[in-house]
Image (cartoon, rainbow, N blue to C red):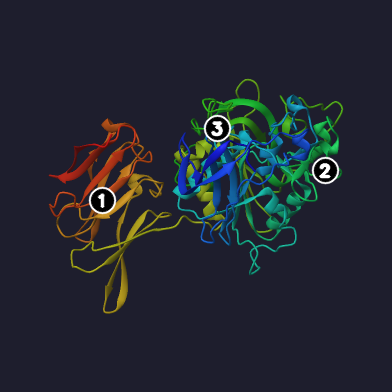
């Protein structure tokens, strides 16, 4: 449904993010005709009732993820329509928080919140700019960082919505030929609003051996229920302008306190942001492996989910905005800074999961506590890991300690990043070899065919570069020296260094060949790169184009150094 004028250009893209910008992966573009459509009375309750403008058939081979239809009409008016393409039988499931997106939608005059009329009956069938790609970073925009991080780590996943998750009520996990096969389920950023059925599905998933990764804050806080046709939700226990306390999970009858399943619960709103601090006695916990963090060490001290973004709030540090603790006064009772009334609605007692470990706590900021990072082994056989902070995803993509902690937890759940495999002639014997990198041990192995058998041998280790260097840095394989052997060239955005790995006497030997800081820090910003023998020298070079100024550059290995020359402009 669109309301627009004349010809509308519709661009379909798949979205993710590992920076302050969104990565739009183009799918296709087409045109449709639109007309202006009147806004009916009470669209927040009944929907717009607009006539269908166009439909889009998703091809069978479409990759799972969060997509957007970006629409621009003949007058230049723009709108974004996000949609989810579900996956099938991946080891990691990621829930898109469409219930929370809806709760914060006040388009048409009212919404669920007090400042938007405190409506109880809220329709999905209307525009929702706040949940678009340029909307507030506690909604869809914030969830893209978690997806971008998974892709950079080469961890395959599938996305589903809250509605899809609720529909798994009677589907077995990890045993059915048709059911989900998740070793890990991720709920991230701001999964505030859940249905009772979703809560039941989550409990059954954990009971059947699944692992939960709660990479957000203010999660499973308040109940909302779908209407029978699932085109709307009923909040505030169905009472227009009713007290939200009546729908809080910790106050339901019987209570379903979130900390009994997550290990943490909403402590407070309005946390400007702080780093986590390693708890005493936890520095040697398996989830801190390879981080080199000592007791009382700070980490998560920077991030991207901050108040420079439209609708942002915090300073971007990992423990911020709305935070959860395991045992703070707000988690046990009623959260602070949330306009709630504990004197009217006392919270009944609750229990923490058996064996809960508090790994780290967000630094208190003078106004209240920071987020608790916790984990425990569930009786069903999996684990539950909780970050307890809305801003966590924006720090996960840039903080090396957070990266390793989550990777360690995923490994404990049975999820490993994909190994990097490369085929080329690395030995110069005019036969193909297979080179692969194994992230958990930082080892490189070479496979060569001899006597009709593939034989493997260890050729190197890159732990000195930092653990698990398949962190999104680009790798290229080609003959850069002109010696009839392939080498491995990689660029590290963290320090702008370029490294070349060559097989010498059976060992993958690395040497620094250049630095491109003068081009601007982190040139892995979406500009395209090409590898080929561009000058006919018998050596491959690196060519890139920078859309910012339309310049073209060529990098060639000269006397062991990657030398850059300006080729021209296409402005």
105 vs 358, nearest the viewer: 105
Q: How far apart are marks 2 and 3 (CA)?
A: 47 Å
Residue identified by numbered label 2:
255
From the image, state whether disc 2 or disc 1 is nearer to you. Answer: 1
Residue identified by numbered label 3:
77
Assign a secondary structure to mark 1: strand
Q: Where is residue 545 in the image (x, y as percent from the top left)?
A: 29, 40
Q: Quick check: 235 left or right of 262?
A: right
Mark before the other along the chain sequence, 2 or 1:
2
From the image, state whether disc 2 or disc 3 is nearer to you. Answer: 3
Q: How far apart are marks 2 and 1 (CA)?
A: 60 Å
Q: Residue 531 carries which label?
A: 1
Q: Where is the N terminus found, in terms of image quarters?
A: top right
User: What's the residue at 67%, 28% (across, down)?
Assistant: 269
Q: Where is residue 84 in the image (x, y as percent from the top left)?
A: 59, 49
Outermost residue toward the top in this view = 366
Q: Quick check: 15 left or right of 378?
A: left
Q: How far apart are marks 3 and 1 (CA)?
A: 40 Å
Q: Quick check: 340 left or right of 506?
A: right
Assign a secondary structure to mark 3: loop
Quadrant housing residue 429: bottom left
User: What's the residue at 69%, 58% (across, down)?
Assistant: 380
363 vs 58, nearest the viewer: 58
From the image, state whether disc 3 or disc 1 is nearer to you. Answer: 3
Q: How crowded is mark 1: few (under 14 residues within 10 Å), some or many (20 or more)?
A: some
Q: Where is the C terminus found, in terms of image quarters?
A: top left
């Amino acid at each position: 449904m669109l309301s627009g004028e004349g010809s509308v250009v519709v661009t379909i893209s798949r979205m993710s993010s590992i920076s302050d910008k969104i990565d739009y992966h183009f799918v296709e573009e087409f045109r449709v005709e639109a007309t202006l459509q009147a806004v009916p009375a009470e669209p927040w309750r009944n929907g717009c009732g607009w006539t269908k403008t166009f439909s889009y058939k998703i091809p069978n081979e479409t990759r799972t993820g969060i997509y957007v239809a970006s629409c621009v009409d003949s007058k230049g008016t723009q709108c974004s329509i996000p949609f989810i393409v579900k996956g099938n039988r991946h080891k990691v499931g990621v829930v898109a928080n469409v219930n929370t997106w809806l709760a914060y939608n006040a388009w048409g005059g009212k919404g669920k919140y007090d400042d938007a009329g405190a409506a109880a009956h809220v329709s999905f069938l209307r525009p929702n700019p706040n949940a678009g790609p340029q909307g507030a970073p506690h909604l869809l925009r914030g969830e893209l960082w978690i997806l971008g991080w998974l892709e950079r780590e080469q961890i395959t996943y599938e996305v589903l919505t809250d509605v899809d998750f609720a529909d798994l009520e009677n589907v077995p996990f990890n045993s059915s030929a048709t059911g989900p096969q998740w070793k890990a389920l991720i709920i991230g950023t701001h999964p505030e609003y859940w249905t009772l059925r979703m809560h039941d599905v989550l409990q059954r998933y954990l009971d059947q051996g699944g692992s939960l990764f709660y990479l957000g804050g203010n999660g499973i806080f308040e109940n909302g229920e779908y209407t029978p046709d699932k085109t709307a939700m009923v909040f505030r226990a169905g009472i227009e302008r009713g007290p939200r306390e009546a729908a809080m999970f910790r106050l339901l009858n019987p209570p379903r306190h979130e900390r009994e399943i997550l290990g943490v619960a909403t402590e407070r709103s309005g946390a400007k942001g702080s780093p986590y601090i390693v708890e005493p006695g936890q520095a040697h916990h398996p989830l801190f492996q390879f981080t080199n963090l000592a007791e009382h060490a700070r980490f998560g001290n920077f991030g991207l989910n901050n108040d420079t973004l439209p609708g942002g709030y915090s300073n971007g540090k990992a423990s911020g905005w709305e935070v959860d603790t395991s045992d703070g006064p707000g988690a046990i009772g009623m959260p602070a800074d949330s306009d709630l009334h504990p004197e009217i609605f006392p919270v009944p007692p609750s229990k923490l999961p058996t064996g809960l470990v508090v790994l780290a706590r967000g630094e208190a900021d003078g106004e209240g506590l920071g987020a608790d990072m916790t984990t425990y082994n569930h009786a069903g056989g999996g684990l539950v890991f909780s970050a307890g902070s809305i801003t966590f995803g924006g720090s996960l993509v840039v903080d090396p300690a957070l990266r390793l902690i989550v990777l360690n937890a995923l490994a404990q759940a049975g999820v490993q990043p994909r190994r990097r495999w490369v085929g080329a002639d690395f030995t110069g014997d005019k036969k193909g070899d297979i080179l692969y990198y194994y992230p958990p041990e930082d080892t490189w192995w070479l496979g060569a065919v001899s006597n009709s058998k593939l034989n493997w041998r260890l050729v190197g280790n890159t732990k000195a570069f930092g653990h698990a260097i398949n962190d999104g840095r680009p790798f290229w394989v080609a003959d850069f020296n002109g010696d009839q052997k392939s080498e491995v060239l990689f660029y590290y955005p963290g320090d702008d260094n370029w490294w070349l790995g060559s097989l010498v006497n059976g060992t993958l030997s690395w040497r620094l060949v250049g630095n491109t800081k003068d081009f601007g820090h982190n040139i892995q910003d979406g500009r395209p790169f090409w590898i080929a023998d561009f000058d006919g020298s018998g050596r491959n070079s690196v060519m890139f184009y920078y859309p910012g100024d339309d310049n073209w550059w060529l990098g060639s290995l000269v006397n062991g150094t990657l030398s850059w020359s300006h080729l021209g402009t296409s402005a």
